[in-house]
Image (cartoon, rainbow, N blue to C red):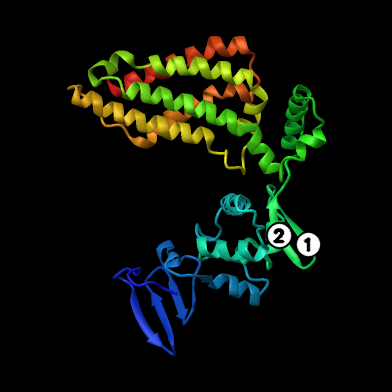
Amino acid sequence: MVRRGEFCATLKKVRFCGILYVTNDSFKCYIKVGEPMGENKTPEPFRKACDKFTILENLMSEQNPGTTKNETSHDKRSKEKIEDAIIKMIIENQDINKPTGLGEVGSRLVSLYPDFDVRSYGYNMLSKFLEEFTRIQMVKHGNIVSVTLREDQDLKENIDSYVVQIVKKAGVTPGAFYGYFSSKEALFAALVEPHAAAVMSRFMQAQSAFSDTPENEQPQHVGQESSECLDWMVDYIYQHFDAFKLLICKAQGTPYENFVHTMVEIEVDATFRYLDVLRRLGRQIPELDRRLCHIIASGMFNGIFEIVVHDMPYEWAVRNVRQFQQFYLAGWHHAMGI
């Protein structure tokens, strides 16, 4: 249903035959009670104002199979965006040990995107549409169809390899080890969580140490705490390299997929707090766009973890990561005008 306050004042409204007809020079909509529908070019705010919005071109192409749809920027929402939304649903349900049914996927997609319709992608059934995706799969148990994460063979091999090392040290069999975990996701979390938490904790400790420094002394400490933290991180990563290989390279679709992004956001927040300190100290600091700062910090942190992605030798990492950080620090100073 359409919520009040969502229409632009310029829209002309005419009621006839129990249907609200909404139009302007660029689009037309027909709103039968409980059944909002309109042309493919209907503006996004109007679509989002509905619980469900049906695209007229989909109805026309269904009635006339040979009809060519007039595709616009509204025609298809990114399939990757749809897949990401479904993966998020699955993970949320896994956290409470609940299966994700096909019907739930359909209803929640419509709740997220009122104009979602598999016919926009050339399908008549949601199940056929989902078969296109590479990161999810459908599993049938009797008459019940569930949607699950597709097993990543590379991830399985990496986990198996890491488990072999662990069980050798523990003196148990792989079968006994796997038996302690209810699912692959639970095993993944058990393998990476201690190390993700250790790095994040050390990172936050460095952030706190700098922010707790008296403001008039902070300019002399820039880079000191972060350099010490970075040295510690490199050592720790190489002591637990296989776990970080999983965390950095294989966490997509798990609660850990935003691990680096979280560090980036923390760094950006800290940067803006430091800019305020410099202004209070009387420094002439230019206004910096938060999006630009995010890009810079993202480049720095993702660059650091390239040592894991590309299996860099430890000696190379120790030598070059510090130089990499100095390069970014100089860039920050230039951007800040100091």
User: Is disc 1 placed on a helix, strand or loop?
Assistant: strand
Q: Residue furthest front?
A: 171
Q: Quadrant of residue 291?
A: top left
| Crowding at mark 2 (Cα within 10 Å: few <14, some 14-19, many 20+) | some
Is the residue 222 above or below the residue 159 in the image? Answer: above
Residue 146 numbered mark, or none: 2
Q: Residue furthest left?
A: 282
Is the residue 105 above or below the residue 309 in the image? Answer: below
Towards the viewer: 38 or 225: 225
Residue at 65 percent across and 22 percent down: it is 241
Towards the viewer: 93 or 287: 93
Is the residue 130 above or below the residue 5 in the image? Answer: above
Q: The residue under label 2 is which amino acid type?
A: Ser
Quadrant of the drawing holding the N terminus: bottom left
Q: Is residue 300 visible?
A: no
Mark toward the start of the polypeptide (2 vs 1): 1
Q: Which residue is mark 1?
A: 141
- C-alpha gap between disc 2 and disc 1: 8 Å
Q: Is residue 134 left or right of residue 18?
A: right
Q: Is residue 273 left or right of residue 108?
A: left
Q: Are marks 2 and 1 in contact (CB under 8 Å)?
A: yes
Residue 24: x, y in percent?
Answer: 37, 72
Q: Is residue 322 visible?
A: yes
